[in-house]
Amino acid sequence: MADVRTLEEHASFGGVQGFHEHGSREVGLPMRFGVYLPPQAKQGPCPLLYCLAGLTCNEQTFAIKAGAQQHASRHGLVLVTPDTSPRETGIPEADAAGWDFGTAAGFYLDATREPYARHWRMESWLMKELPDVLASRFPVQADRVGILGHSMGGHGALTLALRYPGRFRSVSAFAPICAPREVPWGEKAFRGYLGDDVSAWKDHDAVALIERGGRLPKLLVDQGGADQFLASQLRPERLEQACRSSGQPLELRRHESYDHGYFFIASFIGDHLDHHAAQLRAG
Amino acid sequence: MADVRTLEEHASFGGVQGFHEHGSREVGLPMRFGVYLPPQAKQGPCPLLYCLAGLTCNEQTFAIKAGAQQHASRHGLVLVTPDTSPRETGIPEADAAGWDFGTAAGFYLDATREPYARHWRMESWLMKELPDVLASRFPVQADRVGILGHSMGGHGALTLALRYPGRFRSVSAFAPICAPREVPWGEKAFRGYLGDDVSAWKDHDAVALIERGGRLPKLLVDQGGADQFLASQLRPERLEQACRSSGQPLELRRHESYDHGYFFIASFIGDHLDHHAAQLRAG
C-alpha cells in the first residue's frame, strides 16, 4: 500500500474530489495529485483518465476550473490531475526562470541537464510510479486508461501517449503545444531540461514523433480561434499536417472566438469526456 | 450610457463571460462585476440573475468556480457577479480586520459606522446604481430579475429580496448565513458596519425580516450536511422555523457529505438555474 496522504476531500456530483500527496521515489520529493472518484467507484473499479494541466497550474487548477466532474460522474470515470512540476526543490533557477520554465512548468519529461536532472522526472513519475500508487489506493481499472491535457499538458498527453504505445486507450487535447521544438515555450524548456542537442528534442515533440511513425488512438483536439498563443506557441496546423501525412486519425475542431483559458476548456470538456468514455468503456 | 470599462472577455458556452469596472457614485470608488451573456442575448434582452459570492471572494470567483454558465446558456439567462466589497479604500482597518470583515466582506449592506460609512455602500450600489449601469450597457430585461447567493452572499440574496419586495421574481441560496445577528460572522460585521445598537441589526437579518412579515417568492435553499460552518455560522433551522411560522414557502434541501465550498455549489447550480429560469420566464 503506497504511502499517500490525503490533504482535502470534497463531495462533488455524487462522488468525491480529493487532493493527495505522496513521497515520490522518482522525483525525490513529495508530489501532489487530485483524484475524482465518481459515484460508480463505490461499486467497483472504474476507468481512469489523466488530465494534465498547463503552465502555472497545479493539481487543483483543472479540478476547480474545468467542470469535468459532472461528466466523469455521468460516465463513471476516475479523473487524476497531477501537479505540473516538482515543488520546493531548493533550486533558485527553477523559481527565477519565469512562469514558462521550472516550477509549475515540468513539460512532462525527464530532465537530463543539471540542475534539473535530479528532481524534474515528471515522465517517470507519471508513467512508472503514479500508476502503481493509484492502483494500490483507488478503485481504478489499470487496463482502461485515457489521457488528456491542456496547452503544456496537451503536449504532455500527446507525447506520453506516443512514447508509450498501448498504454492509453483514448487521447485528447485542448490547445496543445503541438511542435514544441519550433516555438519559444518548447525551445526554452527543451534547452533547459534536455540541453543543446536538438536531436534529443524530437523524442518529446508530438509532431516529430508522429512523423517518425508514432501512432495514437483516434485523436480529438479542440483549439480556440481567438487563442492568444495560437500562432506563436501552439501551431495546430503542424499537427494536422503530420497526422494527414502519416494517416493518424485526427478530429481537430476549431472554435471561433474561444481563447486559451478555462472558460474555453469548460465549454467543451463534456465532449472530451464523451470521447474518452466511448473508448475506455468499449470492448 | 454608463462609464463601464471592460477588463476581460472570454467566450463561454456560446456566450461571453466578461469582467467590467465602473466608477461607482454610491461607493465612491471603482467597482468590479462580471457579466455572462448567454447566446440568446445576441437576439434580444434576457432575464437577469444576480449571483452574490461569499467571504474572501471577488467578482471572478463565482464565474470561475460555480459552473453556472452552461445552465445560463441553456436557459438564456444573464448572470451578474458583483464584487463583495469596495477595494483599495485606504482604510487600514479594512484590511487588518481578518478575512471575515472589511475588504471582500461587505455583507451587502450600507455601513453607518465610521470609517466604513463612506465607501461600504454595497446595498445602494447593488439596488440603486448597478441596475441602471447594466440596463444601459447590456441586453437585460429589467423587469425579470432574480437573485442567488452563497454564504455571506446567501445572506445578501435573502435580505435584499426581503428589503425590496417585488424587485426579484426568484430567490435562492447556497448555505446562507440565515440569522447573522446570532452568529460570530454576522455579529462582527453588524457591530463593525452598523454599530452597537442591535435593534438596527434586525433590518439586515433574514430570519428577523421574515418573522417581521417579510415575504419572498418560493425560496430554494441548498445546505451541505458536512459544511464546516453549519452550526456555528449558518443555522438553516432558524430559517426553516421562521418560514414555517410565517407561511413563507421554502424548499430546504440538505445534502449529506457536501461541504461549504464551490464543489458543493457546482454540484447543484443546475437545479438553481432551473428554479430561477422557471420563475423568470413565467408570465
Image (cartoon, coloured by chain):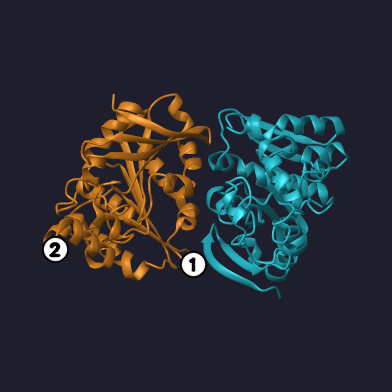
Chain colours: A orange, B cyan
Viewer-nearest of discs 1 and 2: 2
Asked if residue B145 lies left or right of residue A273, the reply is right
Q: Residue furthest bottom?
A: B1
Characterize the local packing of mark 1: few (<14), some (14-19) or many (20 or more) Cα atoms within 10 angstroms: some
**B96 relative to B196 in the view: left or right:** left
Instruction: For mark 1, name the chain.
Output: A
Residue A30 picture location, percent across and down = 29, 38
Residue plotted at (55% across, 52% down): B61
Q: Residues within 10 Å of mark 2 (few under 14, many from 20)?
A: few
Q: Whole-percent x and y of residue B273?
A: 66, 47
Q: Is residue A212 visible?
A: no
Q: Is B140 in front, or is B246?
A: B246
> Which of A139 and B88 lies nearest the eye of the viewer?
B88
Q: Which residue is mark 2?
A: A198
User: In the depicted view, which residue is nearer to us: B275 or B262?
Assistant: B262
Of the image marks 1 and 2, the number of the one nearer the N terminus:
2
Q: Secondary structure at mark 1?
A: loop
Do labels 1 and 2 touch, CB within 8 Å?
no
Residue located 28% across and 36% down the image: A130
Q: Position of residue B137 (x, y in %)?
A: 68, 70
Q: What residue sits 77% from the left and 56% below the top?
A: B144
The kind of residue on which mark 2 rests is Val
At mark 2, the secondary structure is: helix
Tell me the amino acid under the disc marked 1: Ser
Q: Which residue is mark 1?
A: A257
